[in-house]
Image (cartoon, rainbow, N blue to C red):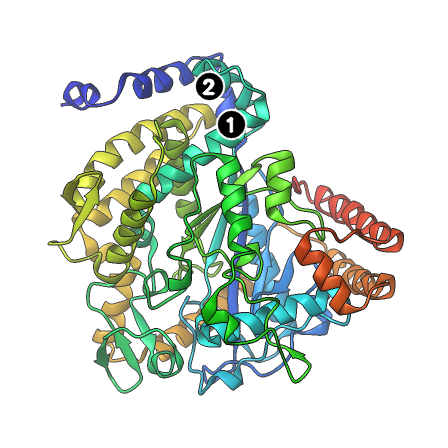
Amino acid sequence: MKQRRMSNIKPSWRENLETLSLPQFLPALKGIRRGLEKEALRVTADARIAHTGHPTQLGSALTHDHITTDYAEALMEFITPVGTDAERTLEFLAVIQQHAYRLIGEEYLWPVSMPCYIDNEDDIELAQYGDSNIGKMKTIYRQGLKNRYGSMMQTIAGVHYNFSMPDSFWPLWQKIKGDRQPLQDFISESYLGLTRNFLRIGWMIPYLFGASPAVDSSFLKNSRNRMQLENFGQETQYLPHATSLRMSELGYSSTEQDHLEISYNRLSEFVSGLRRATNQQNKMFESIGVKRQGEYQQLNSNTLQNESELYAPIRPKRTVKFSEKLSDALQGRGIEYIEVRSLDINPYSETGIDLEQMHFLDVFLVYCLLNDSPSLSQQQQYTAKQNLNKVAVCGRDYSLLLIDGQQSKTLNSWAEEIFTDLNKVAQLLDHAYHEGNFKAAVSNEYQKFGSPELTPSARMLKTIQEQELEISAFALSLAKMHRRKLFKNGYRQIPVTKFTHDSARSWQMQKELETADTLGFDDFLHLTLEGTFSSPPALEKAERDYCFWSRHQNQSLGCCAR
């Protein structure tokens, strides 16, 4: 059986795996870098969105390295440093949330992706970032999102997984591939290959980890997206085979972006497509107006207000300077890492993601990187998006068919093919790391295809149906349990003084940014959107001081900061 499976693997794929398993190459696989970003709504004890502002003791949401806000004042975002120890990174995420719980009083962190009960959009206060030009621009950007898509969509939360290979890997991989272009060009090309493969088979992520098969009825009442769901109880609506309504057309999506034609085949094409989208006039958004009675309604009326507005399950990324565009950073310095954005919050983990998920994602992403990755046409991208939406809406339906190239395949048969290769990658990583975590993670996740009742989405529906719970009551009970766990678990100590220093320094940085502004906001916005804004010396000094301080703080924790 093993020999038959091996014969189906392309020679280049087999040779790459065999070469990387040699003693002189194997160590280069060790040292994968990861960073986590987790969003979570603050909610009251009766499972409603909190109306309190972002706690000042946590620091400035504009400039804090690890604790900020996303769309709304009540939508918190927790960010870990980048590190090579997955367990340490996950623990840091836990400690940040533990610290937040100390300062949010009787509120809870909502443990699922779809929002709690929200009576109407006016209950959702946009995130505030102070009086600096940059802070004002961030809030106006959110005002634009509200006017374009509605606030309900923007309160959906998730987990982002940032991934990059160790620096030592790339020269060896380039040698194995027989590539002679400049190393950074090769790295960028390789990450784009990873991205294309992820788009092709990324439907697997909502199947395995999707945890939003049901929503509170208030979401549908206020949402601009329409989808026919089934009723359960008085306050819950669901789909019986759904895995991730968050990743469906009901969730975090934009029909206005369906025809952007952003290519992932070459970095120059991706950059030009991103720039084109931020300069492309959009008739629907023009009807909103940029200013109304002197108040900004959005940053501009283009299809994307800025590059952050691009909705995608995965993004090529590069660390940017404080006021730098991603496209400029990518064009100038190439791709540094990739960001996976298709993960629902794991409701069964107090951190929102667990270690097994991280090990599986490492295997999955390394597989996407090492495997051949032909160019992806716009039609193929559309097909991949349809596959993802099908799995999000009805992934646990045994009759579901997906499109692989020109063929229709059942979800299980396609998964069988992929897992054959994932097992080989997992074995390779286990040899490099001298452990068995990667193979164990792949083996455990594989069980979910033969037994869909093991998926988080199925477990959630089973619980609410058997216990006759509304989705909000189910989530609130988990939130209370997670809070107890976060305080009970004995994490490796991170000094309390670090959080005190982080908070104080972030407020100082925000004040310096506000003091350093020399332009009126209209001029600042015009130059920033044009890409010609140049930071005045005082602002540059504030940014440099903050970056130096951030690196020093992160390195004192044994972390590798971007």
Q: Which residue was labeled with disc 1? A: 30
Residue 435, how many percent across, how many down?
42, 30
Q: Quadrant of residue 496?
A: bottom right
Identity, as a three-letter code, of the amino acid under mark 1: Lys
Q: Quadrant of residue 246?
A: bottom left
**Residue at point 71%, 47% (across, down):** 321
State the residue in front, 439 or 522. Answer: 522
Label 1: how many Cα within 10 Å (few below 14, some 14–19, many 20+)? some
Residue 187, how many percent across, how many down?
53, 28
- Name the side, left or right, on which 493 lies relative to 460: right
How many numbered marks does the figure carry?
A: 2
Q: Which residue was labeled with disc 2? A: 26
State the residue in front, 11 or 435. Answer: 11
State the residue in front, 110 or 69. Answer: 69
Q: Is residue 492 above or below residue 107?
A: above
Q: Which structural element holds mark 1?
A: loop
Quarter holding the N terminus?
top left
- Residues under numbered marks 1 and 2 in contact, where contact means CB atoms less than 8 Å apart: yes
